[in-house]
Amino acid sequence: MKKIPFVTKEQLEQIVKAYPTPFHIYDEKGIRENARKVYKAFSWNKGFKEYFAVKATPNPILLKILQEEGCGTDCSSLTELMMSDACGFSGHDIMFSSNDTPAEDFELAGRLGALINLDDITHIDFVEKILGRLPETMSCRYNTGGQFQLSNGIMDTPGEAKYGFTREQMTEGFKIMKEKGVKHFGIHAFLASNTKTNEYYPALARILFKTAVELKEETGASIEFINLSGGVGIPYHPDEEPNDILAIGEGVRQAYEEILVPAGMDNVAIYTEMGRFMLGPYGHLITRAIHEKHTYKEYIGVDACACNLMRPAMYGAYHHITVAGKEDAPCDHKYDVTGSLCENNDKFAVDRMLPKIDKGDLLIIHDTGAHGFSMGYNYNGKLRSAEILLKEDGTTRLIRRAETPKDYFATLDVTGLMDKYLN
Ligand SMILES: *Cc1c(COP(=O)(O)O)cnc(C)c1O
């Protein structure tokens, strides 16, 4: 499917007058429409809730938009909990799905009354010690082990993943927590990332639903929610088929009718913790071509780098690029599009066929709305970019300013040495 940016060259020309490149821009209209579709897909389930995975795009203004659409937050760290709290998410609006969790994180999760989704059986005692006693509602993350396979092949290898309880530990953990006074239970699993098939959630749901029925029989625990976590993918490449969330919701409904309803578990709420699917397509990284270099290959140097978007450098991930104003021009030039890091993997595209790029052109790098800005870093002393919201009425709002050198130097403790650049 042809990938069409949500901003035009004319809009960008206006925006760059106020905010210099590079920056990430988010599309409020697209975010809201997509969130509504997610809720429609699961409207058959009374307790359904999407807990947006904050790590994907930790910006309070975006969290507030998702909150208005009915979402909670899924946190995995202290600062994500703080941000959720500050945005007015409270109690069971917050899912805390962390691993290798520091005591202070559990302490805040407990204080906020968040739903705690344990990653390991040893954390039962750990949490009990920190909070004095276990909350009345607890959840456990299940790791199925081995390989996870769907009809189109092996999706991932949970047996190699650090997360979750084994199947035996799930039973044991539930028994222990029941004895310690826990009354309401949930189960969770995340078996594959960025899945590009409508089969993933339904297949995962079948596994978790069967496990829930077994756990109820084995332990008598009252299982009140099943959390399908994240992992629903997006079409980064134009050749990829987008997931159909309505079909996914329907697939989960069928599994629910087949497995949970006959077991008398027709009150179980379905939760999701999507990050990528909620925001990925609704963010662009906007960057300007500042150099062209002709050596053994043709290079276009842009003013963004892997510090602004790590996925291509880290995973070799494909991110589609549109040259603003050249949407319909023939892609008859082969380029490597590079950032300025002293790392040869700092390339947004390798051997990519694009229209002829001229210095000064604005490049739109697609699908940076999740795991984009948030994976940023400061290598080579690069500064984090601004984030801008394109509002539904077409106006823009700066929702994070760009870092300055002063921000970068601020944590140094060097008795006046850097004062020239700090004052
Ligand atoms: C990363 C993560 C998510 C979100 O994953 P997406 O691939 O962005 O949907 C959800 N839950 C947990 C526990 C995660 O670690």
Image (spheres, helix red, strand yellow):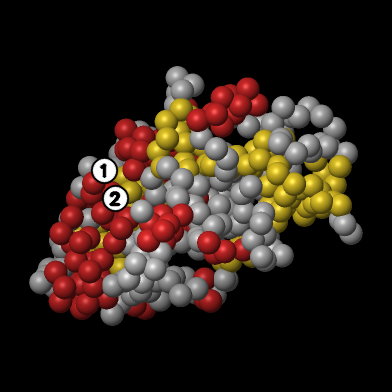
Q: Is residue 149 visible?
A: no
Residue at 50%, 54% in the rendered image:
383
Which residue is situated farthest in the left direction here?
Answer: 132
Instruction: Give coordinates of residue 218: x percent, y percent.
Output: 28, 71
Instruction: Give coordinates of residue 359: x percent, y percent.
Output: 75, 39
Q: Is residue 278 left or right of residue 340?
A: left
Q: Is residue 176 above or below residue 55?
A: below
Residue at 53%, 51% in the rendered image:
372
Displayed quadrant of residue 141: bottom left
- The number of numbered discs placed on residues in the rendered structure image is 2
- What residue is disc 2 on? 83
Instruction: Give coordinates of residue 339: x percent, y percent.
Output: 67, 54
Tell me the element at label 1: loop
Q: Nearer the viewer, residue 170 or 330?
A: 330
Residue type pointed to by label 1 = Cys
Tell me the element at label 2: helix
Q: Is residue 100 left or right of residue 315?
A: left
Pointer 1 local density, CA inside 10 Å: few below 14, some 14–19, many at least 20: some
Residue type pointed to by label 2 = Met
Q: Nearer the viewer, residue 287 or 318?
A: 287
- Quadrant, the N terminus: top right
Q: Is residue 421 left or right of residue 113?
A: right
Alpha carbon distance from label 2 to label 1:
6 Å
Marks 2/1 in contact by CB < 8 Å: the verdict is yes
Residue at 38%, 57% in the rendered image:
422
Q: Is residue 94 above or below residue 146?
A: above
Q: Is residue 203 left or right of residue 419?
A: right
Residue at 67%, 66% in the rendered image:
343
Disc ID at residue 87: 1
